[in-house]
């Protein structure tokens, strides 16, 4: 992953936008939001949801940087299920900049179906991918949409 000087500082406005969109789109499913380590100097937004693939709770840990890049990491408590959508530039690698780490192999870097680069559209796309797979009860569908939302 690029160092913080390449990514820039955390984008506070982007994190606030992400939180608002999760609350607007998922209404009562958002159980809790927190900023880590705190809301004064956040590094990450954590959104806990009251639904998941394998149990009743799941969480997105989200980071946005001012120069470019994001990370939407999904996990479920009491389960090994996790995946990640990300965008980052890595010099001298063959990994796609916009990539997806699938639940079957979180070290793998697949090309992401999400092409957007602004917080609103990326967040809507992540929610759409997650919700589509959740409704089908099939995590293998997470990266199968054609340029969501």
Image (cartoon, rainbow, N blue to C red):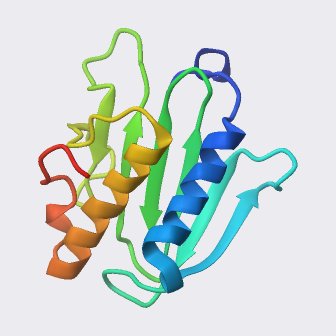
**In the displayed structure image, the side of residue 48 where residue 71 appears, left or right:** left
Residue farthest along the bottom direction in this orientation: 56
Q: How many marks?
A: 0
Q: Position of residue 42 (x, y in %)?
A: 76, 47
Q: Nearer the viewer, residue 149 or 138?
A: 149
144 or 13: nearer the viewer? 13
Residue 119 relative to residue 35: left or right: left
Q: Is residue 99 above or below residue 38?
A: above
Please determine whether, in this image, residue 2 is positioned above or below residue 64.
above
Relative to residue 122, is residue 3 depicted above or below?
above
Position in image of residue 27 (x %, y %): 50, 79
Does the image show residue 76? no
Give the residue furthest to the front.
Answer: 24
Residue 7 lies, with reference to residue 76, above or below; the image says above
Given the current orientation, which residue lies at the most extreme right position? 40
Horizontal relation, residue 94 to residue 48: left or right: left
The residue located at (32%, 52%) in the rendering is 125
Q: Quadrant of residue 118?
A: top left
Which residue corresponds to the image point at 59% horizontal and 60% vertical from the top-left?
19
Percent across and percent down for residue 127 are 36, 62
On the rendered structure, is 105 left or right of 92?
Answer: left
Please identify the quarter of the rendering in which residue 140 is found: bottom left
Residue 14: tell me if it is visible. yes
């Amino acid at each position: 992953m690029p160092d913080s000087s390449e990514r820039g500082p955390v984008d506070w406005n982007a994190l606030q936008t992400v939180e608002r969109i999760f609350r607007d789109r998922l209404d009562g499913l958002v159980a809790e939001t927190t900023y880590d380590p705190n809301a004064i100097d956040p590094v990450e937004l954590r959104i806990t949801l009251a639904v998941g693939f394998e149990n009743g709770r799941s969480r997105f840990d989200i980071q946005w940087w001012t120069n470019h890049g994001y990370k939407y990491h999904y996990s479920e408590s009491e389960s090994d299920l996790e995946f990640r959508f990300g965008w980052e530039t890595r010099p001298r690698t063959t990994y796609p900049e916009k990539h997806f780490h699938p639940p079957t192999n979180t070290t793998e870097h697949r090309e992401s179906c999400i092409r957007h680069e602004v917080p609103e559209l990326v967040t809507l796309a992540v929610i759409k991918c997650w919700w589509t797979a959740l409704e089908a009860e099939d995590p293998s569908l997470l990266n199968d949409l054609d340029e969501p939302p």
